[in-house]
Image (cartoon, rainbow, N blue to C red):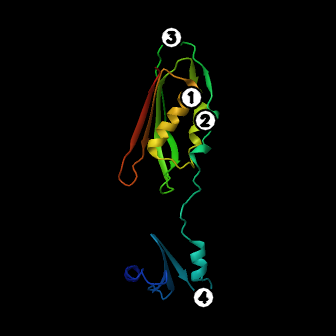
């Protein structure tokens, strides 16, 4: 059967996306070629899907998900609490490796780690609300470089820190590793 599959793979550019082949057991097999997806299916006397049904079932999608606009991220979900030691410059480090957004170019998900370092002035960010805020990016189409700027803007607007740095360390995609960061200092 391996030899038959190899012969069929050579002929995947036929006009029809279905290329018939025979197995060693004389069962009629076919291959459906849709872009990069190859589906093998077996057709015998009791069960057979027609080419039209298969093409409908496995229709390739232009975008695998609905990409939401950046405006759908609502910074109003962020909450704060009073910092009880405003004279003490306590540096807080917050990190989550569960950040996900969508590449606006390809529609594919981007996974990364978000790191937030800040020195509070009078208010601290409540972590549960921060988690909900970051989850809002899950279906948002936003470039990696823009994520850090948007998150920084929203967090600074929420808690008005003395200093803050936001870093987005993305998982490698296409052989490229991206780390974006931006800083704010109160003047």
Residue with the most extreme front position:
187
- Tell which circle, 1 or 3, labels the residue nearer the N-terminal end: 3
- Tell which circle, 3 or 2, labels the residue nearer the N-terminal end: 2
Q: Which mark is residue 45?
A: 4
Instruction: Please tell me which residue lies in front, 19 or 83.
Output: 83
Q: Which residue is mark 1?
A: 157
Q: CA distance from mark 3 to mark 2?
A: 27 Å
Q: In percent of the image, x 47 and y 15: which residue is there?
A: 89
Q: In percent of the image, x 53 and y 28: which residue is there?
A: 156
- Tell which circle, 4 or 1, labels the residue nearer the N-terminal end: 4
Q: CA distance from mark 1 to mark 3?
A: 21 Å
| Secondary structure category for the residue under label 4 | loop
Q: Which mark is residue 5?
A: none
Q: Which residue is mark 2?
A: 75
Q: Which residue is mark 3?
A: 87
Q: Residues within 10 Å of mark 1 (few under 14, many from 20)?
A: few
């Amino acid at each position: 059967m391996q030899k038959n599959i190899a012969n069929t793979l050579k002929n995947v550019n036929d006009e029809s996306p279905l290329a018939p082949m025979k197995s060693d057991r004389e069962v009629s097999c076919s291959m459906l070629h849709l872009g990069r997806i190859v589906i093998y299916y077996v057709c015998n006397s009791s069960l057979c899907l027609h080419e039209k049904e298969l093409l409908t079932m496995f229709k390739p999608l232009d975008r695998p998900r609905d990409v939401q606009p950046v405006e759908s991220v609502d910074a109003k979900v962020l909450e704060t609490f009073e910092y009880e030691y405003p004279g003490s410059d306590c540096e807080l480090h917050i990190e989550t490796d569960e950040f996900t957004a969508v590449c606006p170019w390809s529609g594919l998900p981007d996974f990364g780690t978000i790191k937030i370092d800040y020195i509070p002035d009078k208010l601290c960010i409540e972590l549960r609300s921060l988690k909900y805020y970051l989850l809002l990016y899950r279906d948002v189409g936003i470039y990696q470089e823009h994520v850090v700027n948007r998150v920084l803007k929203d967090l600074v607007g929420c808690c008005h820190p003395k200093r803050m740095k936001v870093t987005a360390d993305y998982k490698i995609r296409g052989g490229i590793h991206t780390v974006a960061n931006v800083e704010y200092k109160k003047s």
